[in-house]
């Protein structure tokens, strides 16, 4: 008689035999930098040379489809239908990565060659997102090989453009709405709250990028001959920025503040560890006063200046610059009117006398904020299964502090979303030396094997 123990043993063997490491190595070897890819075909090779063999073993009927956005990379979609009587789970993953950042990693580490150092696996994509969706696929395979069925229907969406804003994903979900019809999305991205405790999150903060520019003239002018009579764009822009957030990071635009920090959200966040990081000391007095660190991170909005320029800091000259520019970002939770963020900013700057500051938002990379209700039945099911496996309470957060195209699934496909991350905060995601501890990957593989097994039993 088949048993869960056999499925768990199958997953354990993937590490003891080296099969998991070997497969992850092959995925890391495929360079999938979506920002600098020469062609869509280069990115699509991740499907054919990377994960298609596992999908075939899972019995999925797959298809590579063109991106509805002509310049966007293709998608991989697929279905495994066991019975119309069963529930259907949708799985999402992205195979693209941020740039390799070659030459910036620790000595002896090449970003597209998997390396194991001190029980940690290094390589671009091991945390975001190749390692995470590989765990889910292999956990599904362990269940299927043991039970000869999953016990639920499975559908998949893989994309190669998440790191450049998921071009075409929204249009794809609209176009294939009937094809993707499912009961729940269960996927993995982002970090756990604590490395040793499973985390579930139900959505993500949104992100709006925009530029502010003060531009007054052509060419720089000698600061001795013209200082005091020509407007300094750097100075003007600095004051405009200080009107958006105060010196402690508190947002000063009232309409940029959310209305969704409910008692249920606060209750969930109170159960999280108060220590945000074991390695990075946070600034307790930064951000919205009166909120806990977790409330600021998961339940509130934050304003950041991503880049700031006036002149050349490496080769300065004694001149008043013609212009100054800042690349800014608002991370926001549900309960924020994202469609009015820029107009609220325009009104706020004008009110404070900064009509001369231009807002450039045409090239913004936007993700909408979205969140599945904390009281939904799928969270109850998954939380129960994960806590039984873990042997204690897990961490449940309303949304990831970062951004994902979660609203494709909640808004267009109209399904609840359950995200179970297989990484941790100190993984150096989007930076040199991206890595994940082997122990965390092993635990996640067993955790997901157990989850899929029980979901297949109709628990």
Image (cartoon, grey):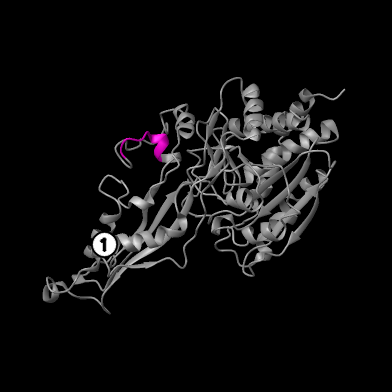
Residue found at the far top of this picture: 391
Residue found at the far right of this picture: 1
Q: Relative to 67, say whether 400 is above or below.
A: above
- Residue 292 falls inside the magenta stretch: yes
Residue 120 visible at all = no
Q: Relative to 376, say whether 47 is above or below.
A: below
Asked whether 356 or 285 is in front, the reply is 356
- x then y, percent, for residue 377: 65, 33
The number of discs equals 1
Residue 184 visible at all = yes
Q: Is residue 442 left or right of residue 320?
A: right
- x then y, percent, for residue 190: 54, 42
- Highlighted range, magenta: 289-296
Quarter of the image where one finds residue 173? bottom right
Q: Helix, strand or loop at disc 1?
A: helix
Quarter of the image where one finds residue 396? top right
Q: Characterize the local packing of mark 1: few (<14), some (14-19) or many (20 or more) Cα atoms within 10 angstroms.
A: few
Q: Residue at x 45, y 57 (%)?
A: 208
**Quarter containing the N terminus:** top right
**Quarter containing the C terminus:** top right
Asked whether 144 or 413 is in front, the reply is 413
Q: Residue at x 47, y 62 (%)?
A: 364
- Residue 167 falls inside the magenta stretch: no
Q: Relative to 388, say whether 50 is above or below.
A: below
- x then y, percent, for residue 209: 43, 59
- x then y, percent, for residue 247: 25, 47
Q: Is residue 345 left or right of residue 422?
A: left
Residue found at the far bottom of this picture: 218
Which residue is identified by label 1?
351
Q: Is residue 102 left or right of residue 385?
A: left
Q: Residue at x 61, y 48 (%)?
A: 410
């Amino acid at each position: 008689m088949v048993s869960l123990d056999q499925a768990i043993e199958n997953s354990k063997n993937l590490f003891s035999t080296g099969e998991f490491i070997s497969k992850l190595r092959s995925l890391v070897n495929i360079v999938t930098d979506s920002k600098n890819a020469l062609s869509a075909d280069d990115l699509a090779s991740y499907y054919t040379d990377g994960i298609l063999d596992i999908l075939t073993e899972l019995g999925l009927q797959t298809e590579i489809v063109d991106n509805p956005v002509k310049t966007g990379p293709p998608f991989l979609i697929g279905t495994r239908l066991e019975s119309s009587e069963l529930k259907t789970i949708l799985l999402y993953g992205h195979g693209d990565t941020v740039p390799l950042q070659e030459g910036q990693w620790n000595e002896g580490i090449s970003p597209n060659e998997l390396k194991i150092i001190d029980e940690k696996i290094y390589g671009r994509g091991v945390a975001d997102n190749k390692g995470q969706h590989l765990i889910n696929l292999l956990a599904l395979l362990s269940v299927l090989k043991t039970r000869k069925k999953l016990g639920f229907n499975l559908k998949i969406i893989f994309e190669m453009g998440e790191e450049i804003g998921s071009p075409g994903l929204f249009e794809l979900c609209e176009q294939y709405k009937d094809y993707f019809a499912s009961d729940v999305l269960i996927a993995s991205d982002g970090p756990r709250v604590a490395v040793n405790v499973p985390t579930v999150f139900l959505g993500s903060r949104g992100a709006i990028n925009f530029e502010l520019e003060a531009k007054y003239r052509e060419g720089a002018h000698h600061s001795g001959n013209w200082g005091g009579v020509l407007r300094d764009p750097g100075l003007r822009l600095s004051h405009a920025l200080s009107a958006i957030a105060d010196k402690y990071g508190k947002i000063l635009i009232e309409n940029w503040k959310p209305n969704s920090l409910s008692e249920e959200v606060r209750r969930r966040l109170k159960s999280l560890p108060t220590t945000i990081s074991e390695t990075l000391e946070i600034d307790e007095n930064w951000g919205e006063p009166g909120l806990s660190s977790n409330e600021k991170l998961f339940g509130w909005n934050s304003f950041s200046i991503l880049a700031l320029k006036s002149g050349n800091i490496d080769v300065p000259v004694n001149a008043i610059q013609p212009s100054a520019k800042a690349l800014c970002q608002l991370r926001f939770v549900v309960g924020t009117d994202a469609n009015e963020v820029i107009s609220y900013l325009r009104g706020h700057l004008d009110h404070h006398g900064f009509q001369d500051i231009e807002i450039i938002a045409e090239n913004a990379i936007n993700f909408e904020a979205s969140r599945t209700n904390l009281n939904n039945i799928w969270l109850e099911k998954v939380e129960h299964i994960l806590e039984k496996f873990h042997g204690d309470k897990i961490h449940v957060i309303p949304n990831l502090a970062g951004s994902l195209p979660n609203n494709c699934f909640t808004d267009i496909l109209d399904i609840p979303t359950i995200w179970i991350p297989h990484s941790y905060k100190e993984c150096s995601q989007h930076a040199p030396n991206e890595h994940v501890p082997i122990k965390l990957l092993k635990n996640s593989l067993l955790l997901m094997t157990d989850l899929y097994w029980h979901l297949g039993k109709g628990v």
